[in-house]
Amino acid sequence: MPQHTDDSTRFGVQLVRSRDTPTRLALAALVGSDRFWTGFVVVLPTVLLLATRLHHVFVSFAAGVPVAICLWLQTMSHEFVAPCLTVDTETGTLTTSKSYDSGNTSTIDVSDLERVTVIRFANTALVRLHYSKWTVSKPVSATVPAARVPEFASQLERVGLDVSVREFDSLASASDMIRLRVFGTPIAVLGSFVGIWSLHGPEAFFTDAVVVPAVVLVIFAALSFVRRFRLRRAETSAV
């Protein structure tokens, strides 16, 4: 339910169910700049795959990259389980929080932002925060309910932020970067696995560069499932 005070508005999204997993992964694929995505998901695996033809030392690294990408996607998707974003027009701040994360919050001053891009899906919308200076200590994305995007954009415009709203269209041109990232990420990951397997066989995946991130991925996925289960149970008990 929307929550308001005189000067602040809270936007909450719930993506805790297993059937919400494709949506969370689609949002995760859109985290970060297009340049980052191109370099990490497309260029790096391709370069390392080609390098395996030059020297065998690159094989383990090339095999580990798609697993690392999966781990990154899993980590980012967990950020969209049950996030909340509060806009305070009086103080000119945005505050992100997660209901399952012991009340931890991150506050962003609008003066640190250059602009905001909202990508609207059917039921939720991804908020991409573009900072005026490069930072690693602040969140780069958040979510708001799709139905409340106009209200959210209006709140940001009140504090002087430039807001652009884009619609996710699965039938859009293949050159559309949003569609390319959502559908291109799993294709790139699968292509990396197939390429390494075809060139070097299954033994390429039995190295520390693959096994270690794969184990972390499984552990993190299990912890994420437990947290989502507890969150659903807590919400059911509260009703």
Image: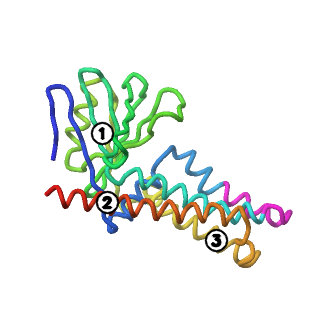
Residue 51 belongs to the span the image colors magenta: yes
Q: Position of residue 152 (x, y in %)?
A: 24, 38
* Residue ID for mark 2: 230
Q: The residue under label 3 is which amino acid type?
A: Phe
Task: Please indicate whether residue 45 sits to the left or right of residue 21 in the image.
Answer: right
Q: The residue under label 1 is which amino acid type?
A: Leu
Instruction: Tell me, for residue 85, which label it has, or none.
Output: 1
Q: Quadrant of residue 195?
A: bottom right
Cα distance between the residues tagged 3 and 2? 34 Å
Q: The residue under label 2 is which amino acid type?
A: Arg
Task: Please indicate whether residue 63 sits to the left or right of residue 41 in the image.
Answer: right
Q: Which residue is located at x 34 percent, y 58 percent? A: 169
Q: Residues within 10 Å of mark 3 (few under 14, many from 20)?
A: many
Residue 109, compared with residue 105, is above or below; it is above
- Judging from the image, the colouring scheme is rainbow
Going from N to C along the chain, the mark reached first, 2 or 1, is 1
- What's drawn in magenta, residue-wise? 44-58
Main SS, magenta residues: helix
Element type where label 2 sits in the image: helix
* Residue ID for mark 3: 193
